[in-house]
Amino acid sequence: MSFTLHFIEEAEEEYLSCRWRYEQQQKGLGARFEAKIELTLTKIAQNPKAYKYGMGPFREAGVATFPFIIVYEIDEQHKTITVLSVFHTKRNPKNKYKKS
C-alpha cells in the first residue's frame, strides 16, 4: 500500500532552491535533479520502511547521482510520510533533523 507524501514548508523550500541552483549551473541539470528526487520520493511512498533510521523516528533515503538525502517520518496510522528535509550531505549533519 502506498503512503501519501507531504513536505514541511522548509523542506519544500530547500528542494525548490536546490533545483533552481542546479538549473542555474547548467541548463537541464535542475530537471535531472527533480527527476531523481521524484523517483526517490516514489520509492519512499511505496516502501517507506526500506530505508534506514537516522535519529529517533526519522529515516533517510539517499538520492541517486546527487549528494542529497531525503529525511522523513512515517505516520503508520494515517498512512502518511512527512518529508522534513532535502538535505545536502556536505552540510552540517546536526541540522538535518531540525524541523519546525
Image: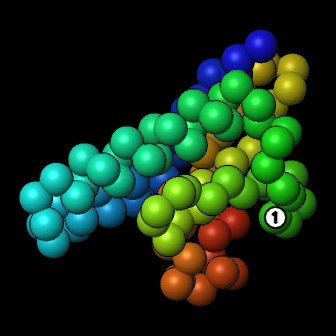
Q: Between 55 and 24, which is closer to the camera in this rendering?
A: 24
Q: Is residue 9 left or right of residue 87?
A: left
> On screen, 39 above or below 72?
above
Which x, y percent locates residue 83? 60, 45
Residue 45 quadrant:
top right
Which x, y percent locates residue 53? 86, 58
Which x, y percent locates residue 35? 37, 42
Dot 1: what SS?
loop
> On screen, 71 above or below 38?
below
Q: Between 38 and 97, which is closer to the camera in this rendering?
A: 38
At 44% across and 47% down in the image, what residue appears?
Answer: 36
Residue 24 quadrant:
bottom left
At 69% across and 48% down in the image, what residue appears?
Answer: 72
Q: Is residue 100 left or right of residue 97?
A: left
Q: Between 30 and 6, which is closer to the camera in this rendering?
A: 30
Q: Is residue 14 left or right of residue 26?
A: right
User: Label 1: which residue?
Assistant: 54
> On screen, 10 above or below 8?
below
Q: Is residue 94 left or right of residue 70?
A: right
Which x, y percent locates residue 46? 70, 25
* Amino acid type, mark 1: Gly
At 23% across and 58% down in the image, what residue appears?
Answer: 29
**Within-10-Å neighbours for mark 1: few <14, some 14–19, many 20+:** some
Res. 82 visible in picture = yes
Placement of the N terminus among the 4 image quadrants: top right
> On screen, 56 above or below 67?
above
